[in-house]
Image (tube, rainbow, N blue to C red):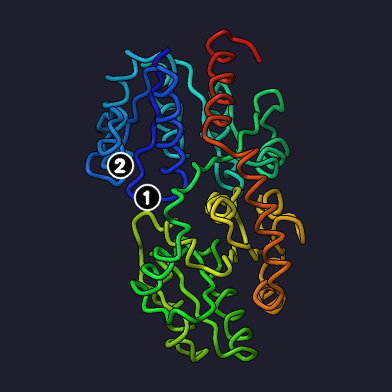
Amino acid sequence: MRILHLNNEKTWRGGERQTLLLAGGLRNRGLGSVIGCRPGAPLFQQAQAGGLPALPIPGHNASAALALGRVAGSFDLIHCHTGRGHSLAALTAAWHRKPFLVTRRVDFLPSRGWFNRYKFRRAARVVCISRFIADQLAAWDVPREKLTVIPSAVPPPDPALRSPAHRTAVRARLSIPPEAKLVGNIAALVGHKDQATLLRAARTVLNRRSDVWFVILGEGELRAPLEQLRRELRLDDRVLMPGFVPEAETCLPAFDVFAMSSCMEGLGSIVLDAFAAGVPVAATAGGGLPELVRDAETGLLAPVGDADKLAEAILQLLEEPSLAARVGAAARAWVQAEHSVEQMTDSYLTVYRQVLAGTS
């Protein structure tokens, strides 16, 4: 079985990391797994660094369609990891004549244009990373028998990352005082991540406590308005926004609380990383996040867009060490049991075999 993983995004986000993890898991099973991605993009570089074969698929234009049409014939199956990849596979389906499936990672509905309808009809299977997404697509009229839920996965963190020395080093790199309480967020600076709500929550937290710092790791189109809001809220000295940090998940053990403020979220795989690191999570109930953060069990939940409730959840985790320890331990045990890369790989292998066998 030879699988072409199609993901030619420019950036490095959760979907690109999941593509890499799955390709690596399939390699460990002895399967021919190749990543089709933009030459020079972070995913291409990461694949090469990890010894995974990668084919250049340039952009999302006619050149990309031609490149996909030329290489697809040597594979048994195309796995599209993005909406753009899905479009490419559908556009070239009459040429490559290979079955393809798509992983849907976002929790907003496609538009109802004819091409979106066509490309979902052509896909042999649509894998959703949360039940929330599957329910959305079913309501959008994708047949239930075509939908499969396979959540994202995370590898176990390096034990060295949990050492006091690593925590101290991360805080020093971020210019955080060693004795401070640190609340962290790792997400692109885009609308659905809603860091504006997190900034307003930070103002409320800092009105109550003077020993707390916040850090938002990520880059994106909303940097300027978020920095303006940070100034308006007088948070410049307590909310750090250093930009994109490679392998940002390695910073998690330095956080006392991980805060996720998304108003929309397919699942939120970075929350799984926080769970794996044993960091207590305060999150909003956007999209698939409640499937991970079960209130008072694996973290604390606040309503979407409610800065006061999010601040309350953050403060509760900071001020009740026993609660923070309990939900952190429960979340870590759960993610180890339910979200391993091996489990995700096995689930996708089952789907691949069903698609190639022409079964549901």
Q: Nearer the viewer, residue 150 or 192?
A: 150
Looking at the image, which residue sits at the far left?
40
Q: Position of residue 181 (x, y in %)?
A: 54, 78
* Percent position of residue 177, x then y: 43, 82
342 lies left or right of 246? right
Name the residue tied to disc 2.
46
> Measured from the top left, where is residue 339 in percent x and y?
60, 39
- SS for dot 2: helix
On screen, residue 231 versus residue 296, left or right, reads left
Tag 1 residue: 12
Would you place residue 7 above or below residue 160 in this image?
above
Residue 220 in view of the camera: no
* Picture residue at 50% right of the left edge, 77% below the top: 214
- At 51% from the left and 68% from the top, the residue drawn is 255
In front: label 2 or label 1:
2
Query: At numbered mark 1, what does the secondary structure look like: helix, strand or loop?
Result: loop
Check the image and name the residue furthest to the top.
Answer: 357
Q: 313 and 108: which one is in front?
A: 313
User: Looking at the picture, how far across and down is residue 215, in whole percent?
Assistant: 46, 73
State how far apart marks 2 and 1 are (Cα): 10 Å
Task: Look at 52% across and 31% down and name the residue there.
Answer: 102
Q: Quadrant of the N terminus?
A: top left
Residue 7 versus residue 145 in the image, above or below? below
- Look at the picture and state if 70 lies above or below 282: above
Q: Are marks 2 and 1 in contact (CB under 8 Å)?
A: yes
Instruction: Inspect the image, locate mark 2, and give the three-letter code of the amino acid beneath it.
Output: Gln
**Which residue is more in the foreground, 157 or 92?**
157
Give whichever of 146, 178 is nearer the camera: 178
The residue carrying pointer 2 sits among few (fewer than 14), some (14 to 19) or many (20 or more) residues within 10 Å by Cα, namely some
